[in-house]
Amino acid sequence: MNQLQQKIISAYKNRFSNKPIVVCAPGRVNLIGEHTDYNSGFVLPASIDKAIFLAMSKNDLGIIRLHSVDMTPDYVEIPVSENYTKSEISWSNYIIGVVDELKKAGHKIEGFDCVFGGDVPIGAGLSSSAALEGGVAFGLSHLYDLNLSKLEMTKAAMQAENNFVGVNCGIMDQFASLHGKKDKVIKLDCRSLEYEYYPFSWDDIRILLCDTKVRRTLDGSEYNNRREQCEKGVQIIKEKYPEVETLRDVTHRQLESEKDKMDDVIYARCLYVLNENKRVLDACQDLVNEDLIGFGDKMYESHRGLKKNYEVSCRELDALVDATKELNSVLGARMMGGGFGGCTINIVKLEKLEETKAAIRDYYKKKMGIEPDFHVAKIGSGTHLVSKSIETESIENQI
Ligand code: GLA
């Protein structure tokens, strides 16, 4: 049992007396395919070895009792209800949002206790909130014998974020956290929800995350605004091509033919999405060919599109990507996630990892006056049960 797990279990024992199950719910990275999920496009994420652990058990009190090991205020009690409302304790909304979605789907969720915490940096773009939501769906399915599939858990987790937390996110983060596999990236078609695993493991390569230390939460209106701009583009194209439902259905030729009917910003947003979808497919082919140089080039192109056409980057993210341009130890770098802060993702040669970090640190410090944080992410298993009850401590990796 790792230290983190132990910490969560002892926090649980200090507060509650029932025997909990323990769920491990990882954060995620996304190699390529940004802002494509809510446009029914392609993404290429993976779950990582940084996770939230949740110790959970039912209680007979008709109360949901929640304790966060890392956040303040750290405790909240919410009566089981037919009508949940958003709380001022923002972290509790990720949990109650899932309860509310499961209730809407006809599942009866009574009182339970949950203690959680982990090492997914919060607000860094590694989807700590999706991990929590997915972990809660997984844990409740287990406690209440709901027999939910991982896809059903994913949907409940995403809808919790959309309907309860109020962020209109796509499906990628929750999907990746729940469905990840060790050493594999997931090519997910966000329209059909078909997915395929591609190997992503090389002894001499590491995934390096460079944290700008700039924190912008997703409920900032920019994210929802990008979604609306894409929908606006679809509306315009649809007038001429009624078969078009989302940007996924739009060809470059169709977009060009309708360009004059839309303002430049809408055109740029649509163009980025079309290009990014193609880049994901091409990048998957690079993985099949073991061409990490080609793969890395597409990451740089993705960043350029996100910066210039989609305009979700920021000076700090650009500086971290620029810092790598002269480094031949870095095969690819780009901003990752919603944007406006958080981390860049970099594919780096292991033998030069330390000097790469030092060069990025120097560049960023000079340019921005801040020390970046670094995380080396290993691709780990998706959400799974770590122990059925802390007494038996049976390790059950459901991969
Ligand atoms: C956030 C959202 C995802 C996705 C990314 C951008 O992480 O939660 O659904 O849209 O931004 O690719």
Image (cartoon, grey):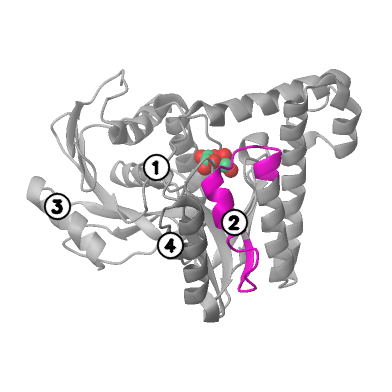
Residue at figure coordinates x 32%, y 23% from the top left: 86
Q: CA distance from mark 3 to mark 4?
A: 28 Å
Q: Percent from the top left, x then y, of residue 100? A: 36, 27
Verify CB contact (< 8 Å) between mark 3 and mark 4: no
Disc 2 packing (10 Å; few <14; some 14–19; many ≥20)? many
Which residue was labeled with disc 4? Answer: 374
Q: Earlier in the sequence, mark 1 or mark 3?
A: 3
In this picture, which residue range is highlighted in magenta? 305-332
Which residue was labeled with disc 3? Answer: 11
Which residue was labeled with disc 1? Answer: 129
Which residue was labeled with disc 2? Answer: 321
Q: Earlier in the sequence, mark 2 or mark 4?
A: 2
Q: CA distance from mark 1 to mark 3?
A: 20 Å
Kindly identify the amino acid type of the residue bearing the numbered disc 2: Val
Quarter of the rendering containing residue 245 = top right
Q: Percent from the top left, x then y, of residue 285? A: 75, 63
Q: Is residue 2 above or below residue 383?
A: below
Q: CA distance from mark 1 to mark 4?
A: 20 Å
Kindly identify the amino acid type of the residue bearing the numbered disc 3: Ala
Disc 4 packing (10 Å; few <14; some 14–19; many ≥20)? some
